[in-house]
Image: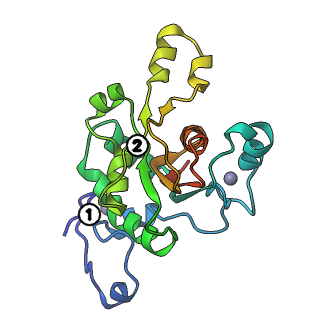
Amino acid sequence: MKCFICASHIENPLSFKTFFHPPQHTNLCAMCSEQLRPITGNRCPVCSRLSEGICLDCQDWKNSRPHMNTLDSNYSIYPYTPMIQTIISQWKYRGDYEIGFIFKFIVQQTFQTLLNFDQSVIIIPIPLSEDRLYERAFNQAEVIASWITPEPKLLLTRRDYEKQAKKSKNERITSENPFILPKTINKPVLLVDDIYTTGTTLRHASTVLKESGCPRVDAFTLVRS
Ligand SMILES: [Zn+2]
Ligand SMILES: [Zn+2]
């Protein structure tokens, strides 16, 4: 069996030890797997950043931008490392659909064992705008969501403010909420995305959802950058 990233030969993919302690990545060699280690240690209970208690970012959302402090929590699997950066950009910007499957097992395992969402939660991937979807051919957030639910709900749509802002050189427009929710949702929602960077995208989405009557919005992301 060959490593999915570096193509080196993987020895003993299923030893006695790995049978009782399932490896996080069955399709990677030990070296690549070592560089794709999940976040361990104390994390901010709101955003998954390494922190003892609620981090400064999240305190700032609460104090300086309370109208957008609408996301109840985000759970990320990986820290942002050079390895993850390479894989994500290959997946996202260079259209390598297959490489994303490195993450499938760990996403499913994390969702089933660490996150406690009941059946009633509505799982919504963060959408791409139509133009972006056309450029990239697929939405990686939707792929991740499809690993944890047979039917991700494509309930949000997204306007391409960034592109408009570039055209008009208008910075202000990027701070506008790009999401539209065509119908009301009054059940808890789990948003799914690939990366949590500043948390602005997820909070734009959670704000729209809460305005429509959604009682709780959490997020599940692959990477906390
Ligand atoms: Zn490897
Ligand atoms: Zn935080």
Res 5 seen here: no
Label ID, residue 155: 2
Q: Which sits in the foreground, 17 or 192?
A: 192
Whether ligand 1 has any atom under 8 Å from the Cβ at mark 1 is answered as: yes
Quarter assignment of residue 103: bottom left
Res 191 seen here: yes
Q: Is 103 drawn above or below residue 63 in the view shown?
A: below
Residue type at mark 2?
Answer: Leu
Give the mark, 2 or 1, whose residue is nearer the N terminus: 1
Q: Is residue 159 left or right of residue 101?
A: right
Q: Position of residue 189 (x, y in %)?
A: 50, 54
Q: Position of residue 193 (x, y in %)?
A: 45, 48
Q: Which sits in the foreground, 75 or 36?
A: 75
Residue type at mark 1?
Answer: Cys
Ligand 1 location (quadrant): bottom left
Tell me the quadrant of the picture where the N terminus can be found.
bottom left
Q: Position of residue 88 (x, y in %)?
A: 39, 46
Q: Which sits in the foreground, 214 or 199?
A: 214
SS for dot 2: loop
Q: Nearer the viewer, mark 2 or mark 1?
A: 2
